[in-house]
Image: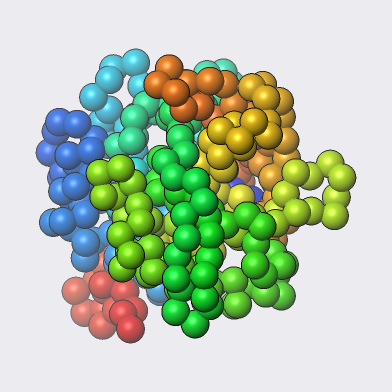
Amino acid sequence: MHVIDSHTGGEPTRVILDGAPDLGSGPLADRALRLATEHKKFYRSVMLEPRGQPAMVGALLVEPVDPSCVAGVIYFDVDAVLGMCGHGTIGLTVTLAHLGRIDIGCHKIETPAGIVTVELHDANTVTVTNIESRRVQRGVTLDVPGYGVVTGDVAYGGNWFFIVDPSPIPVEPGNIRHLTDMTVAIRKASVTQGIGGEQGELIDHVIFQDTSADPGVHGRNFVLCPDDNYDRSPCGTGCSARLACLAADGQLAPGEEIVQHSVIGSAYRLSYQPGPSGGIIPSITGQAHIMAESKLIFADNDPFQAGIEF
């Protein structure tokens, strides 16, 4: 299996060029569902140790339906197939440029959540114009076992988020274990208490939003991903959901740019424009770097061929 690994602000992306199961044709959402329901062993084997690493997201290249798109992609982590991935799209764009498939300029990429536009500024810098994002509920209260009452917003940015602002725990690297434990508990509480999207979609990510001591930085976040790992980047779909909340509250004007840091200090530049259906169209600018190009081997006599499971 031919793969190229990159990281976006410290968050790894593994682009799969060949060797994946045939998902057939049709809409990417249908093919993503086939991956999720029929090929879980495959995608977990790519993400789990010893081949993968914590927080890694896979980007499976597929044929797009829309011929104007340079690529189709289905994202996944070790525990879930994702609708969209912001850091992964930045990493994918840099990877496509590394392969010589695209050049500086604007391009379209098809995802299960919809078509996104990317602008490659240089070998490492990409702006992603995401799908329309929106806040669904404001000031939702959860009773979280072990932590008490927690209030946050439910928003969509290509994935489903519960956003707590201000963070009940300082967003600092030394608090990552505590931040992880509490956000896992919040996500579990959201599921058991029926809090999610308009059609019953489950919360898959949780954000703790904190302030920053740097006057040039709007905030610092901690983002829990579906695999219970934290996002090393500020999370592109999470930032999209966060922008939707800021816009809904009148705290950020269209076109106004802010800087968002992750818990480890990596940065995205963010802005938005009004969307056609009452939401917003986010723009996320970040940098990715190629780390490795390799072939994964799945030997029949490997006791951990399917990855290390606990």
Tell me what residue is drawn at x 47 percent, y 39 percent: 135
- Residue 147 horizontal side relative to residue 265, left or right: left
From the top left corner, tell me how far across and down residue 257 is, in percent: 71, 29
User: In which quadrant of the rendered image does the C terminus lie?
Assistant: bottom left
Q: Across the whole image, how many numbered discs are drawn on residues?
A: 0
From the top left corner, tell me how far across and down residue 14 is, in percent: 43, 52
Tell me what residue is drawn at x 61 percent, y 35 percent: 249
**Relative depth, front residue between 247 and 91:** 247
Colour mode of the rendering: rainbow
- Residue 193 horizontal side relative to residue 288, left or right: left
From the top left corner, tell me how far across and down residue 281 is, in percent: 51, 26
Can residue 291 be seen at all in this image of the molecule?
Answer: no
User: In which quadrant of the rendered image does the N terminus lie?
Assistant: bottom left
Q: Quadrant of residue 113?
A: top left
Tell me what residue is drawn at x 12 percent, y 38 percent: 24
Q: Is residue 111 above or below residue 307?
A: above
Q: Is residue 295 above or below residue 122?
A: below
From the top left corner, tell me how far across and down residue 223 is, in percent: 55, 58
**Relative depth, front residue between 272 and 22:** 272
Q: Is residue 63 above or below residue 30?
A: above
Can residue 132 be seen at all in this image of the molecule?
Answer: yes
Tell me what residue is drawn at x 60 percent, y 77 percent: 178
